[in-house]
Image (tube, rainbow, N blue to C red):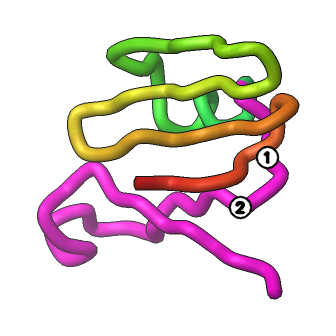
Amino acid sequence: VKKMYAFTFADSEETLGGPVSEIDPGMSVEEVIALKGKPNSKVSLGKKTILTYEDMKIIFEENKLADVQ
């Protein structure tokens, strides 16, 4: 089962006025930062990396996107 995550930088797509940026499972830390921008914090715990933003926490395992909370 392939999961897909989407996020916006506005309250709604109408406010955004354009397409929604998408992040996909398996993307690298660098690819997500290129789409979402610099995180508030970055924590590396062995094979796990966590990026935190105001609206979400993005979790990577072995430099591949694994979960968004």
Residue at horizontal 50%, vertical 54%?
A: 68
Residue at horizontal 72%, vertical 46%?
A: 65
Would you name the residue on which mark 1 appears? 27
Q: Which residues are magenta?
A: 1-29
Q: How many numbered marks does the figure carry?
A: 2
In the image as oriented, which residue stretches furthest toward the front? 46
Tag 2–tag 1 contact (CB < 8 Å): yes
Residue at horizontal 45%, vertical 17%?
A: 38
Query: Is 5 drawn above or below residue 61 in the view shown?
Result: below
What kind of residue is marked 2?
A: Asp
Quarter of the image with the N terminus in it: bottom right
In the image as oriented, which residue stretches furthest toward the bottom? 1
Residue 5: % across, % down: 55, 68
- Magenta stretch holds residue 15: yes
What kind of residue is marked 1?
A: Met
SS category of the residue bearing label 2: loop
- Magenta segment's dominant SS is loop
Quarter of the image with the C terminus in it: bottom left
Would you name the residue on which mark 2 appears? 24
Q: Is 44 placed left or right of 37 in the picture?
A: right
